[in-house]
Image (tube, rainbow, N blue to C red):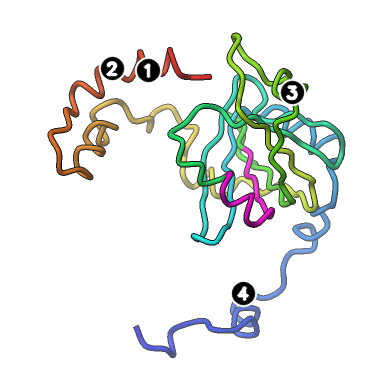
Amino acid sequence: MTSSNLITDITQLDALYGDASPRSLTKEIDALNSQYQSFIEASPFMAVATVGMEGLDCSPRGEQGSVVRVVDANTIQFADRRGNNRLDTLRNIVEDDRIALLFLVPGIGETMRVNGRATISIAPELIEAFTVDGKSPKTVVEVKVERVYFQCSKALVRSGIWDSDIARSFGDVPSAGEMLAATTNDSFDALEYDRMLEKRYSDELW
């Protein structure tokens, strides 16, 4: 690819795409109105993007019901549930508090985007508030909202992500065990790992 085929400055980019549609700008606000709050509270899943000294990270988060708790128009919170202890998201927040969230609602084409600043709390009252089935998160992330707006449904419509007739089943894609086996040189048992997955999820979900 030659340099003449690369976009290297904002002027080139603006000339290529033209002006943003007026409504795409007016829908961006600096706090959660009642409609945006209702959308977020209906979302059981979000992607969390952060940045730190090691680079960027984007991680999934999910809960039964709402994936976050809306405290007020400027504040949302979510639990850091059990995972693999890489702590990519949390390490990044410690180093750089900028955060971006993308909320999905099953069956709905629109998504919600929130940008803000994050802190990590171990306040006992917050830990207790996010306890499920007697299992508590080690930390709770609090986000101060700076920008929020919804994204139109074009991307999800193009993908057909909510169409049941394109849903994949076990065997259509590599399993977790198969992907782990492909990244290790030891005698990892992919079949046994996959066989035990359901039990691990049951024991370690929260």
Which comes sooner in the sequence, label 1 or label 4? 4
Against 53, is 72 above or below?
above
Q: Position of residue 38 (x, y in %)?
A: 78, 30
Q: With 187 as the anchor, is 43 left or right in this view? A: right
Which residue lies under the disc numbered 4? 17
* Residue stretch rendered in magenta on the structure: 90-103
Q: CA distance from mark 4 to mark 2?
A: 50 Å
Residue shown at the point (25%, 36%) measured from the top left = 174
The reply to whether discs 1 and 4 touch (Cβ–Cβ < 8 Å) is: no
Against 7, is 62 above or below?
above
Q: Position of residue 206 (x, y in %)?
A: 53, 19
Please give the label number shown on residue 124: 3
Q: Which is in the foreground here, disc 4 or disc 2?
A: 2
Residue shown at the point (18%, 24%) measured from the top left = 191
Q: Which is in the foreground here, disc 1 or disc 4?
A: 1
Element marked by disc 1:
helix
How crowded is the residue under tag 4: few (<14 C-alpha within 10 Å), some, or many (20+)? few
Residue shown at the point (54%, 43%) measured from the top left = 156
Residue shown at the point (29%, 32%) measured from the top left = 176
Pick whichever, 56 or 35, lies toward us. 56
Q: CA distance from mark 3 to mark 4?
A: 50 Å
The reply to whether discs 2 and 1 touch (Cβ–Cβ < 8 Å) is: yes
Which residue lies under the disc numbered 2? 196
Quadrant of res 178: top left
Which residue lies under the disc numbered 1? 200
Pick whichever, 98 or 30, lies toward us. 98
